[in-house]
Image: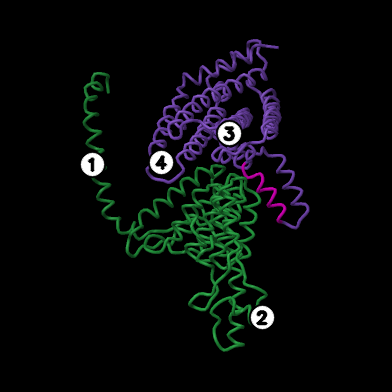
Amino acid sequence: MNPTTSSRSLWKAPVAIPLLLAAAAFLQSRIDAQTRSEAVQKEELLVRSGTLLKKLSLGYDPLLADIYWTRVVQYYGSRIGERDAHFDLLAPLLNITTTLDPHLVVAYRFGAIFLSEPKPAGAGRTDLAVDLVKRGIAANPGEWRLNYDLGVLYYWRLKDYHDAAAAFLAASNQPNAPYVMLKLAAAGIAQKGGSIETSRMIFAELYESTNDPKVRKTALKELRALKAQEDEIQLDKVIQQYEKLFGRKATSMLDLVNARLLPGVPLDPAGIPYVIGPDGKCRLNPKSPIGAPER
Amino acid sequence: MSVMPGVVAINTFREAVRDRVLYNLVFFGLMMMGAAILVGQVSIGINRLVIINLGLSAISVIGLVMAVFIGVGLIYREMEKRTLYSLLARPVRRWEFLAGKYAGLLLTLLVNTSFMTIGLAVALYYVGRPFVRADLTALVAIYFILLELALVTAIALFFSCFSSPMLSTLFTLAVYVTGIFAGDIRDFGALTKSPAVQAFTRVLYYLVPNFHNFNAIAAAGHGERVPLALIWQNTLYAIVYASVVLVAASAVFGRRNLK
């Protein structure tokens, strides 16, 4: 072909290329229509071993972890809200992501939410979420937010107040953690779960360690309330003993003193006498400042 | 000291620029811009992380591709074009020529990596301004990548002294992959009960270049501090190992019959 012929045919390229590209796009859409149903069925994870993928990544594992994390987000996002949504690949995808990059804290935190949310908003697998966060804590020992997340999982999803309090307490001991808030949460949850001793220990430590007068005041108030709670339990036992001995319920603390079951009218940590309520159980005097809302 | 290696190095760099090698920077720039804009739309909480991981991985991969594919052709091309003979007819010793070629490719890689570092910094500033102290670890990671490239270039140059570009590429990549798995080779030996295998894998571990040493991408992504001792140890390791390979290359090239 001589140069003249070549320059003559040069104008054909700008026309031919878009036309051919349009034809290719049309054919691709036909192929997509043909194979779409097949593609929907194929929801699988060819390589499930994060360790193997880490080796195969030839040192580019952090980037691969980002890609897998994006895949997790897309996988969860594409199913959320569907009535019959299945999240079978969520846990394996998260395992791969966190094996590729054990320090990708965001994957543990959001992954735990995706896994623990009840269906159809999530996988409804709090057990797997707890495992994931525990692995995160092991890989990132200084990350208080993971301990906090573990506490939230125990508290909200599993109603395990003992472990929740332990997790919040662990979070409060990490560097840069808002320790007052976490210690208060831990103590409050322990109290709710009936672990008065744990709760008292945390409040006492908080009272000793803080210089903030407001926090000290709160801790002291909670310590007094805990002491009152313990007193009430002990006094209820004495009231039951009185009922066994005399066949009737005690109506006031004086009955217990007169029956020589108590040396004197018992006082709460604020110095106000305890009373016996209409239900026959010991309770704080309404005049007592303990348990009253903070002013 | 002779100025010839410097002259050869400058010419090697000019040749690379003439060959439009630095065009890869356009690709890198477009990729970083795309990632900076798109990642926030499709993922959660990893905008900055992706920019660092993607940027450093791209710097490493592009650098490796350049080091291997240009490195294996450095000597071969000169022989093919017969320019080597006219060069060696001048008062240039063979090792000087080799050193110049090596330095020239390193200069090309340094310039290329510097521009990519600027691109990475711009993308980082776009997604998470202002810069934080932890971003400095990315500079350490880039320095480690440069050390890795210096080592790979030396290996590619060594193979190009006695082999065709195709075979040299295969050999260089084989050494590179082996170097990445150096730790696994040693661990494999530890798994066996045989003291002979253990000794062999241990020797092999110290013999192959350990490229795993130079991977600080994960640390950069999470802003972890890289110990100063590791920086100078890696620097010395790269210098010592590259020197060994270059001395071997010079010995091979010096004995090669160029008639």
Same chain under badges 1 and 3? The reply is no
Which of the image's four quarters has the N terminus of chain A?
A: top left
When the figure is inspected, residue A276 is found, relative to residue A205, above or below; the finding is below
Q: Nearer the viewer, residue B227 or B199?
A: B227
| Residue B167 rendering spot, x and y as whole percentages | 57, 35
Host chain of mark 2:
A
Q: Amino acid at mark 2?
A: Arg
Label 3: state its secondary structure: helix
Residue located beneath label 1 in the image: A23
Host chain of mark 4:
B
Mark number, residue A260: 2
Q: Is residue A263 left or right of residue B119?
A: right
Q: Is residue A19 left or right of residue B158?
A: left
Q: Amino acid at mark 4?
A: Val
| Residue B37 rendering spot, x and y as whole percentages | 38, 36
Host chain of mark 3:
B
Q: Dots 4 and 3: beta carbons under 8 Å? A: no
Q: Is residue B218 left or right of residue A125?
A: right
Same chain under badges 1 and 2? The reply is yes
Mark 2 vs mark 4: in front? 2
CA gap between label 1 and label 4 equals 31 Å
CA gap between label 1 and label 2 equals 102 Å
Q: Label 1 crowding class (10 Å Cα cut-off): few <14, some 14-19, many 20+?
A: few
Disc on the earlier residue, 1 or 2 = 1
Q: Which chain is purple?
A: B
| Bounds of the magenta segment | B180-191
Q: Amino acid at mark 3?
A: Thr
